[in-house]
Image (spheres, grey):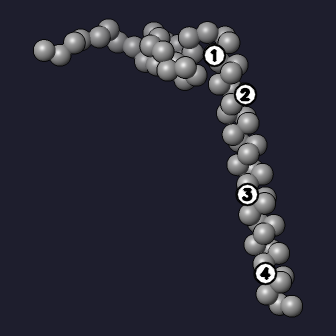
């Protein structure tokens, strides 16, 4: 027999159930999630810069 839950969604930070009109369960959860997002974005930018530098280096070395 299926269980019927009231309408809800999950917190973007900790995945706890929350009311449909909210994105986070608390201010602390929102700050933590935003810091993690920013850190991940910075890492991706660094990865792309490093990959481009390596490709340019390989291209230059191939002409030597």
- Of the numbered discs 4 and 1, the one sitting upstream in the chain is 1
Which residue occupies 81% across, 67% down?
Answer: 53
- Of the numbered discs 2 and 3, the one sitting upstream in the chain is 2
- How far apart marks 4 and 1 lie (CA) works out to 45 Å
- How far apart marks 3 and 4 lie (CA) works out to 16 Å
Q: Secondary structure at mark 4?
A: helix
What residue is disc 3 on? Answer: 48
Left/right placement of residue 20 relative to residue 44 reads left
- How far apart marks 2 and 1 lie (CA) works out to 10 Å
- Of the numbered discs 2 and 1, the one sitting upstream in the chain is 1
Report x, y in % for residue 64: 86, 91
Task: Kindly check if marks 2 and 1 are in contact, taking CB atoms under 8 A apart as contact.
Answer: no
Whether residue 20 can be seen here:
no
Q: Which mark is residue 35?
A: 2
What residue is disc 4 on? Answer: 59
- Of the numbered discs 4 and 2, the one sitting upstream in the chain is 2
- How far apart marks 4 and 2 lie (CA) works out to 36 Å
What residue is disc 1 on? Answer: 29
């Amino acid at each position: 027999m299926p269980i019927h839950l009231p309408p809800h969604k999950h917190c973007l930070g900790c995945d706890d159930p929350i009311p449909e009109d909210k994105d986070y369960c608390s201010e602390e959860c929102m700050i933590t999630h935003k810091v993690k997002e920013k850190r991940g974005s910075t890492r991706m930018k660094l990865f792309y810069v490093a990959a481009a530098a390596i490709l340019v280096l390989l291209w230059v070395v191939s002409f030597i």
